[in-house]
């Protein structure tokens, strides 16, 4: 049975809604990439001021909004959640600025070095007007890059620098973007109108000039990293307990006991290994996990060859999940039923999701950034990934928040929430799909457990490295070499993926554990609600109530669902 959509009651906008909406537009003006992400009107072609002065302007705006929130009284429960979470998010950002973390903001996956380029992936490019905006942003990108270099240079002078490993890796990324055969020239060289028509000659010339300017800016970044920052950078990958605790709170929206969580991660990893071993025996009687994996990797029926075949498979699996779950277990609004599966235009590694624009003119998208040289993919490994990124994972969670505009203000719909909330839900969704019978094939279940095992290992590795914990074998303390060895022992992935992942954890402290810790908190909340409600508990109602909140910190989620 297809469930009909229940219209949301119209909720009158409040003073706190106004503060939150005003913050979004202020933020989007200061950081135009935010407007691109949300698909709202901003400064067309604009680029964030990443200089120290620009960073100071941003934190001044954050302080002003916190003061407004402190002076406002909630009109209802929606307001109460908005004020609690927006104030918490901005206060953490201010605390990070005071800790001067912006002076060392460089890592292999989520720093201005990547974000300046990644915004182009979400920009519309159907019309000549769209391409004109892109040309303007290409021309403006160098100013954003120069501001970023100014901030990193201030970090050198003040002795606040990233680890040398991140500097070296990002320099290689920057060199690829600076190359005449790199992203900017590929992107603009293939520019056409939506109907396949050619762009005006003058616009083609503007795009070419912009590509040259942006590529040159990345060349300057690479030169700076290699000649100025690398010699000044630190040898130590660990950030230490104080910085780590701050970043963990940012990614979870909750304060956790880091030492208890480390021990829990070790136990959770042990449990995942035992479960994998049991499933391996179902695939090949008496087999170890490694033997079952080797068996599956030789199965041509479970192979995808090339990115075109990968994309088609992702899309078909996603479309099937959306159609079936909408007919059975979830109320999925019509706009949320569209999910585009994409091969990312980069080769950095990683699989990620981007939300629909606020008006759904740009649909939700699942992106796969395939490292250079990787041409084969195993369906048994990646079935659960499609559910994680799509439905009932990120796409259902974040798309539902965008759809719920009658109740949630723009900040709640598009920017609120934490990695622990979003990624914790996505891992929770993987287990839910197992419960619903979508992973009955032992091979697909082994793939899901492979991912769950990896996430448990990341809790141990991330806290272990950054808090300088003793190694599990008792041979000294955690470091980058032990992290790489540990990950190779606990995941079945191409080594290029493993190296990228480890570099990501080393440079982005606290983010990787937020997946598994977030899942843990989601499950704790559900179990507590089930124990409280007894026979009256409904999974469907619990999930609807949780998703209708939109993105929130995990402390807020617990308070709202458990009272």
Image: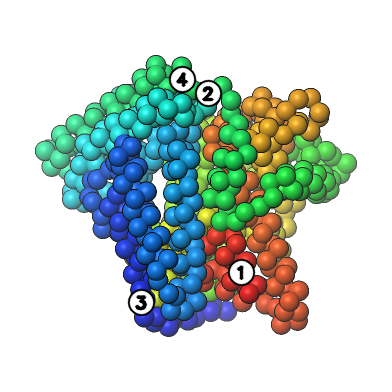
Q: Which picture quadrant has residue 299? A: top right
Query: Counting residues from the N terminus, which is met first, the one under dot 1 or under dot 3?
Result: 3
Depth check, mark 3 against mark 4: the one in front is 4
Q: Classify 10 Å Cα crowding around label 2: few (below 14), some (14-19), many (20 and above).
A: some
Query: Counting residues from the N terminus, which is met first, the one under dot 3 or under dot 4?
Result: 3
In the picture of the structure, the residue carrying the numbered disc 3 is 13
Left or right for 300, reference 140: right
Left or right for 298, reference 107: right
Residue at image position (46%, 79%) is 76
Query: Counting residues from the N terminus, which is met first, the one under dot 2 or under dot 1?
Result: 2
Q: Is residue 508 visible?
A: yes
Residue 148, position as x, y percentages in the image? 34, 34
Mark 1 and mark 3: Cα distance apart in space: 23 Å
Q: Which residue lies furthest to the right in this view?
A: 286
Depth check, mark 2 against mark 3: the one in front is 2
State whether residue 418 is above or below residue 410.
above
In the picture of the structure, the residue carrying the numbered disc 4 is 232
Q: Nearer the viewer, residue 384 or 425?
A: 425
Mark 3 and mark 4: Cα distance apart in space: 51 Å
In the picture of the structure, the residue carrying the numbered disc 1 is 559
State whether residue 179 is above or below residue 535.
above
Q: Nearer the viewer, residue 320 or 543?
A: 543
Q: In which quarter of the image is the C terminus?
A: bottom right
Q: Residue 234 carries which label?
A: 2
């Amino acid at each position: 049975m297809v469930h009909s959509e229940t219209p949301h009651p119209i909720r009158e906008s409040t003073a706190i809604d106004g503060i939150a909406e005003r913050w979004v537009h202020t933020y989007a003006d200061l950081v135009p990439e935010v407007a691109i992400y949300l698909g709202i009107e901003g400064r067309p072609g604009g680029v964030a001021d990443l200089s120290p002065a620009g960073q100071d302007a941003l934190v001044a705006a954050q302080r002003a909004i916190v003061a407004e929130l402190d002076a406002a009284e909630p009109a209802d429960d929606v307001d109460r959640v908005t004020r609690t979470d927006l104030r918490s998010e901005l206060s953490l950002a201010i605390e990070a600025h005071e800790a001067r973390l912006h002076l060392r903001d460089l890592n292999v996956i989520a720093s201005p070095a990547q974000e300046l380029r990644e915004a182009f992936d979400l920009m519309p490019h159907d019309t000549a007007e769209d391409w004109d905006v892109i040309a303007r942003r290409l021309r403006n990108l160098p100013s954003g890059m120069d501001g970023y270099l100014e901030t990193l240079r201030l970090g050198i002078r003040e002795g606040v620098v990233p680890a040398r490993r991140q500097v070296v890796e990002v320099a290689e990324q920057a060199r690829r973007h600076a190359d005449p055969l790199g992203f900017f020239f590929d992107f603009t060289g293939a520019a056409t109108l939506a109907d396949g028509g050619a762009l005006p000659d003058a616009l083609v010339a503007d795009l070419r000039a912009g590509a040259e300017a942006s590529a040159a800016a990345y060349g300057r970044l690479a030169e700076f990293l290699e000649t100025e920052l690398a010699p000044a950078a630190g040898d130590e990958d660990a950030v230490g307990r104080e910085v780590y605790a701050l970043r963990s709170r940012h990614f979870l929206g909750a304060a956790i006991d880091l030492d208890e969580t480390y021990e829990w991660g070790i136990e959770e990893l042990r449990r995942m290994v035992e479960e994998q071993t049991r499933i391996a025996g179902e695939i090949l009687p008496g087999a170890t996990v490694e033997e079952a994996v080797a068996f599956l990797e030789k199965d041509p029926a479970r192979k995808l060859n090339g990115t075109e075949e990968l994309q088609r498979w992702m899309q078909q699996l996603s479309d099937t999940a959306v159609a079936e779950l909408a007919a059975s277990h979830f109320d999925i609004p019509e706009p949320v039923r569209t999910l585009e599966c994409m091969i990312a235009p980069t080769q950095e590694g990683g699989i990620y999701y981007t939300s629909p624009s606020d008006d759904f003119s740009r649909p939700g998208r699942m992106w796969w950034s395939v490292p250079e040289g990787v041409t084969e993919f195993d369906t048994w490994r990646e079935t659960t990934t499609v559910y994680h990124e799509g439905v009932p994972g990120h796409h259902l969670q974040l798309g539902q928040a965008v759809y719920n505009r009658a109740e949630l203000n723009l900040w709640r719909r598009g920017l609120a929430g934490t990695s622990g909330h979003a990624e914790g839900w996505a891992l929770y969704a993987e287990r839910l799909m197992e419960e619903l019978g979508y992973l009955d094939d032992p091979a697909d279940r082994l793939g899901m457990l492979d991912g769950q095992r990896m996430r448990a290992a990341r809790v141990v590795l991330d806290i272990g490295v950054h808090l300088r914990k003793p190694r599990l074998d008792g041979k000294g303390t955690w470091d980058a070499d032990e992290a790489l060895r540990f990950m190779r022992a606990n995941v079945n992935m191409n080594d290029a993926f493993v190296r990228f992942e480890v570099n990501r954890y080393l440079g982005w402290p606290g983010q990787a554990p937020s997946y598994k810790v977030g899942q843990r908190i989601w499950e704790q909340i559900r179990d507590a609600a089930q124990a409280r409600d007894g026979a009256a508990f409904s999974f469907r109602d619990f999930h609807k109530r949780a998703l209708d909140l939109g993105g929130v910190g995990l402390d807020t989620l617990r308070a709202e669902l458990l009272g």
